[in-house]
């Protein structure tokens, strides 16, 4: 699966026409202990660049921004009971699974090297 | 932005820094949860040097403090601390503060960092007709809060300062390493604990000694907020403000209407007689979703009846809870309400504001 990154610290892992969206390891470290993940519902449409939910640390809520558009086909229910999974392994504990409506949007995202530079600049 | 005398220590510890009350302050070091639990279970130290201090002395000092402050310091013993507020004539809160009685007609006021300029102007503007000397000491004093069930033992053993004799809300002044310090049994965490005021160099020395002992967790403002919130203590800017009165905030016990005239007395007497239109309540959600400052509180018909002042998924009680200022009609315990969190509303119920039991030493 190819992984793309957004400057707002979400990733999307793409498998054919399906994308797994989560937050990056850099983002989970910056957030600290994740205590709640506010997720959309299956069937909701998410739009690239728009928020689709929020992820909350003890201190604050941060919007989750969709890196690409599509229909939500699954949400990671495990996070409802155990949001700390995001801290344990952010890259494998995706938040939503979407059916991509416009795969060409992926070209606007960053590859791993370009994303690493974004993180470095913020640090 | 202002920096406290411990700023470099925070940076060296790798703290996450953020602006608070005009200062660049540490929010967390190891993590809010770890720091919060250290204070509940053992001992943590907070740099609270951003707090402001004002010294008031002179023949009319007691009269003056009683005029600007809601609690009653009349005839109190030296070494007593008081919590209370300075009020606008409307009853809104200029600031909430601690007052230390240092001597007959000598008091020490500890005020919030964000309000230092406003408070000092307020104090100076009301001194006419009182024979008092007012010294603004904020820039020359550091302050440490050493909090948690182990605090007394650690201060005694690590610092060599005798503090077991201090009762809750009392203080003493002594010379430590050749310098004057004030140590009080006070705090803002709901745990037993102490606060120490001294000059900058000694503040750094005490901080370093505490950390070097390995028995004290450095704690940031992140857990200071979660700790005070869980025991229902107000934060100026959230539960108190220029247009929220102590009656609305449930703090009438700190406003002594049976003493002589003080600023805001008439407004508070009137509000107490008539009943306030808003009340600060506790809310508990069933869901894990987190009510944050400013989120709307709704009744069952989805009409807005107030807003959240502080909310967390609270660490020591593992529940999503909040304090909220709501229409008094909805302030009764067990009243069902809702909180709007982004695009959804979540059911909540009115509960007591003391979400976690305080463990003060009497």
Image (cartoon, coloured by chain):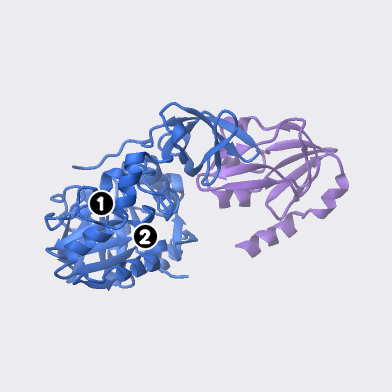
Which residue corresponds to the image point at 46% horizontal and 40% vertical from the top-left? B324
Marks 2 and 1: which is nearer the front?
2
Which residue corresponds to the image point at 57% horizontal and 43% vertical from the top-left? A56
Which residue is labeled 1 in the image?
B186
- Describe the element under mark 1 as helix, strand or loop: loop
Number of other residues with Cα within 10 Å of mark 2, as a class: few under 14, some 14 to 19, many 20 or more: many
Colour of chain B in the image = blue
Q: Can residue B191 be seen in this view?
A: no
- Assign the C terminus of chain A to one quadrant of the image: bottom right
Establish whether labels 2 and 1 are both on one chain: yes
- Describe the element under mark 2 as helix, strand or loop: loop
Question: Measured from the top left, where is residue B271 in percent x and y?
Answer: 35, 44
In this picture, is B72 found above or below B231? below
Q: Is residue B352 visible?
A: yes
Which residue corresponds to the image point at 24% horizontal and 48% vertical from the top-left? B257
Which residue is labeled 2 in the image?
B112
- Between B334 and A90, the residue placed more toward the observer is B334
The chain that hosts pointer 2 is: B
The quadrant where residue A34 appears: top right
Q: The purple chain is which one?
A: A
- Between B46 and B338, the residue placed more toward the observer is B338
Q: In this view, does A112 lie to the left or right of A119?
A: right
- Assign the N terminus of chain A to one quadrant of the image: top right
The quadrant where residue A21 appears: top right
């Amino acid at each position: 699966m190819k992984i793309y990154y957004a400057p707002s610290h979400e990733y999307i892992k793409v498998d054919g026409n399906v994308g797994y969206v989560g937050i990056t390891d850099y983002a989970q470290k910056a957030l600290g202990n994740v205590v709640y993940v506010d997720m959309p519902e299956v069937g909701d449409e998410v739009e690239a660049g728009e928020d689709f939910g929020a992820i909350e640390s003890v201190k604050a809520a941060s919007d989750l921004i969709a890196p690409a558009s599509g229909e939500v086909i699954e949400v990671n229910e495990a996070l409802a009971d155990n949001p700390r999974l995001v801290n344990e392994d952010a890259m494998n504990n995706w938040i939503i699974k979407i059916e991509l409506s416009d795969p060409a949007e992926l070209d606007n995202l960053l590859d791993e090297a370009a994303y690493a530079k974004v993180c470095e600049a913020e640090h | 932005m202002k920096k406290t005398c411990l700023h470099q220590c925070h940076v060296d510890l790798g703290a996450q820094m953020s602006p608070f009350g005009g200062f660049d302050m540490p929010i967390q070091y190891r993590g809010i949860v770890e720091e919060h639990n250290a204070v509940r279970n053992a001992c943590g130290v907070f740099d609270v040097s951003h707090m402001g201090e004002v010294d008031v002395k002179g023949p009319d000092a007691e009269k003056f403090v009683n005029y600007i402050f809601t609690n009653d310091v009349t005839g109190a013993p030296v070494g007593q601390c008081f919590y209370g507020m300075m009020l606008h004539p409307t009853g809104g809160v200029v600031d909430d503060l601690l007052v230390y009685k240092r001597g007959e007609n000598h008091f020490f006021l500890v005020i919030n960092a964000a309000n230092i300029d406003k408070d000092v102007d307020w104090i100076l503007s009301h001194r006419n007709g009182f024979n008092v000397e007012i010294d603004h000491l904020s820039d020359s004093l550091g302050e440490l809060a050493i909090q948690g069930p182990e605090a007394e033992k650690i201060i005694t053993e690590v610092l060599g300062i005798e503090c077991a004799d201090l009762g809750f809300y009392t203080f003493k002044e002594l010379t430590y390493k050749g310098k004057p310090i004030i140590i009080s049994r006070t705090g803002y965490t709901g745990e037993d604990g102490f606060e120490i005021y001294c000059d900058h160099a000694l503040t750094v020395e005490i901080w370093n000694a505490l950390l070097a002992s390995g028995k004290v967790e450095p704690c940031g403002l992140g857990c200071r907020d979660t700790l005070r919130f869980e025991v229902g203590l107000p934060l100026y800017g959230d539960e108190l403000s220029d247009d929220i009165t102590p009656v609305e905030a449930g703090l009438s016990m700190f406003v002594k209407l049976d003493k002589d005239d003080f600023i805001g007395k008439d407004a508070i007497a009137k509000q107490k007689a008539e009943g306030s239109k808003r009340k600060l309540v506790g809310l508990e959600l069933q869901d894990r979703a987190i009510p944050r400052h400013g989120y709307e509180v709704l009744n069952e018909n989805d009409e807005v009846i107030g807003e959240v002042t502080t909310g967390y998924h609270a660490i020591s009680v593992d529940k999503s809870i909040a304090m909220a200022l709501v229409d008094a009609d909805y302030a009764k315990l067990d009243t069902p309400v809702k909180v709007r969190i982004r695009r959804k509303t979540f059911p909540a119920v009115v509960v007591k504001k003391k979400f976690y039991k305080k463990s003060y030493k009497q």
